Image (cartoon, helix red, strand yellow):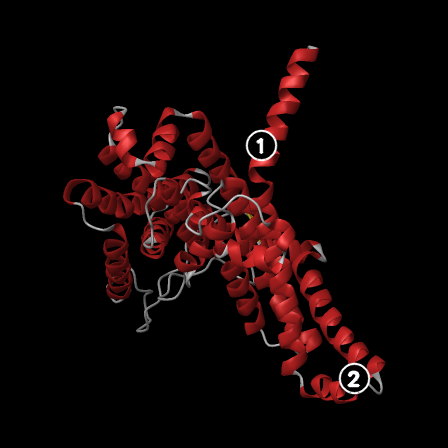
């Protein structure tokens, strides 16, 4: 590599750092502030620890020592439960995988200026279709898994593509449409689980047969499964789409200024439809993680009403924290997966309520969505103005 090439590379890296350092600094500061608020809540919520503060000026070591013991044991258990062993890492990755996939679906739509609130419904259809293929057909190992994954992604893509088509052709607001389609997807799941095609023989409750082993995601340590690799591959694919393809350029251009993009010859309607179709496929992949992934005992998970949980809504916070960028979404998914996995250890070791992890997630998102608030608390982060909406679109707004 020549001296000129090295100099150009260093200049490009310096430009990238100068452009994005504040965004990342605010994200890290948001997490630190959330942890501090969580520590205060732990101290206040524990009567024994909070009572020691009556002696703060006479015996400060009693109050501060008790508070430190409480907070350090809780956060220590959180870290150990999230990354302290191979099994903990496996659990964290398995919980992060669907969040990453759904977060990519929400984040991709954000980059096009669209609010994909329908990742929940898209994930439901992905899980439903993948599970049906998994427990209905008898196919060779490998082929069965590939067919189930592609079928689930196709179902999510169709469900998301409908929203994009309605937005492009009729101007229907994607937020309203996706919210309504979430209800439709949930209702269809509830109905289908009462039919002979989906209900397990001999059972009256809404539960499906287990998928065949040939369609299940391979697992290690009982929790780590191939779905996490799929999530990382999806993140790499979204990065390539956005940064290295003409379609990605159109997505970013439409997200930045649809009028200017249209003037430049880009089809805003086609870009909207393509974006929502791809977003639906990614959210469908999140549903596949639940339908084909192993349970705590390593066995395949049957299809039930609450199988996908609230992954579609949690994905909004993941995309927000990751600033709608693939690498950021992967890191945010791992963070929330670690909080979820370590929350149980924190509860058992430090007698800290499991709901505290939900409070931490909410506070992190609050600070990330309000960068001016973080800059006010930490004045050294003040710089160029950043609109709150820019947190959603990765700085595009």
On-image quarter of the N terminus: top right
Marks 1 and 2, the one that precedes in the sequence? 1
Q: Is residue 255 left or right of residue 21?
A: left
Query: Residue 47 placed where, x, y %?
Result: 67, 88
Closest to the observer: 225 or 342?
A: 342
Query: Residue 143 placed where, x, y %?
Result: 41, 37
Let me know if residue 285 appears in the view. Answer: no
Residue 281's label in the rendered image is none
Closest to the observer: 45 or 186?
A: 45
The answer to which image quadrant residue 9 occupies is top right
Q: Tell me the residue that label 2 is attached to.
A: 56
In the image, what residue occupies the spot 33% across and 50% down? 115
On-image quarter of the C terminus: top left
Indicate the secondary structure of the residue bearing disc 1.
Answer: helix
Estimate the spatial distance between the alpha carbons at disc 1 and disc 2, rounded to whole Å: 47 Å
Query: Residue 164 placed where, x, y %?
Result: 25, 43
Indicate the secondary structure of the residue bearing disc 2.
Answer: loop
Q: Is residue 359 above or below residue 325?
A: below
Callout 1 crowding tier (Cα within 10 Å): few <14, some 14–19, many ≥20: few
Q: Is residue 246 above or below residue 275?
A: above
Let me know if residue 176 appears in the view. Answer: yes
Q: Is residue 122 left or right of residue 358?
A: left
Q: Tell me the residue that label 1 is attached to.
A: 16
The answer to which image quadrant residue 175 occupies is bottom left
Closest to the observer: 247 or 77?
A: 247
Query: Residue 217 placed where, x, y %?
Result: 49, 48
Closest to the observer: 361 or 374?
A: 374
Callout 2 crowding tier (Cα within 10 Å): few <14, some 14–19, many ≥20: few
Check the image and name the residue furthest to the left: 170
């Amino acid at each position: 590599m020549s001296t000129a090439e090295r100099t150009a590379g260093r200049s490009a890296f310096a430009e990238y750092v100068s452009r994005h350092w504040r965004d990342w600094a605010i994200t890290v500061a948001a997490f630190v502030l959330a942890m501090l608020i969580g520590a205060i809540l732990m101290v206040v919520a524990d009567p024994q620890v909070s009572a020691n503060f009556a002696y703060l000026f006479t015996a400060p070591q009693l109050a501060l020592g008790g508070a430190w013991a409480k907070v350090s044991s809780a956060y220590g258990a959180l870290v150990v439960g999230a990354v302290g062993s191979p099994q903990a890492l496996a659990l964290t990755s398995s919980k992060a995988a669907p969040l990453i996939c759904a977060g990519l679906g929400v984040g991709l739509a954000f980059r096009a200026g669209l609010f994909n609130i329908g990742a929940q419904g898209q994930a439901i259809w992905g899980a439903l279709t993948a599970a049906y293929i998994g427990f209905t057909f008898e196919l060779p190992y490998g082929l069965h898994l590939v067919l189930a994954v592609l079928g689930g992604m196709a179902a999510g893509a169709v469900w998301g593509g409908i929203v994009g088509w309605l937005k492009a052709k009729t101007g229907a607001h994607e937020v309203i449409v996706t919210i309504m389609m979430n209800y439709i997807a949930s209702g269809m799941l509830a109905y289908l689980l009462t039919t002979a095609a989906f209900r397990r023989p001999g059972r009256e409750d809404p539960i499906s047969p287990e998928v065949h082993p040939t369609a299940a995601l391979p697992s290690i340590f009982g929790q780590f499964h191939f779905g996490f690799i799929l999530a990382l591959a999806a993140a790499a694919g979204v990065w390539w789409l956005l940064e290295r393809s003409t379609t990605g350029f159109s997505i970013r251009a439409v997200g930045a200024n649809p009028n200017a993009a249209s003037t430049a010859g880009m089809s805003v309607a086609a870009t909207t439809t393509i974006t929502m179709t791809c977003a639906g496929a990614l959210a469908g992949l999140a549903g596949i993680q639940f339908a084909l992934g192993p349970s705590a005992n390593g066995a395949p998970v049957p299809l039930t009403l609450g199988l996908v949980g609230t992954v579609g809504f949690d994905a909004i916070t993941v995309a927000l924290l990751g600033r709608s960028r693939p690498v950021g979404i992967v890191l945010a998914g791992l963070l929330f997966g670690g909080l979820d996995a370590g929350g149980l250890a924190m509860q058992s070791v430090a007698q800290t309520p499991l709901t505290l992890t939900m409070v931490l997630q909410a506070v992190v998102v609050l600070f990330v969505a309000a960068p001016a608030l973080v800059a006010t608390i930490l004045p050294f982060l003040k710089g160029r103005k950043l609109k709150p909406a820019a947190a959603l679109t990765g700085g595009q707004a």
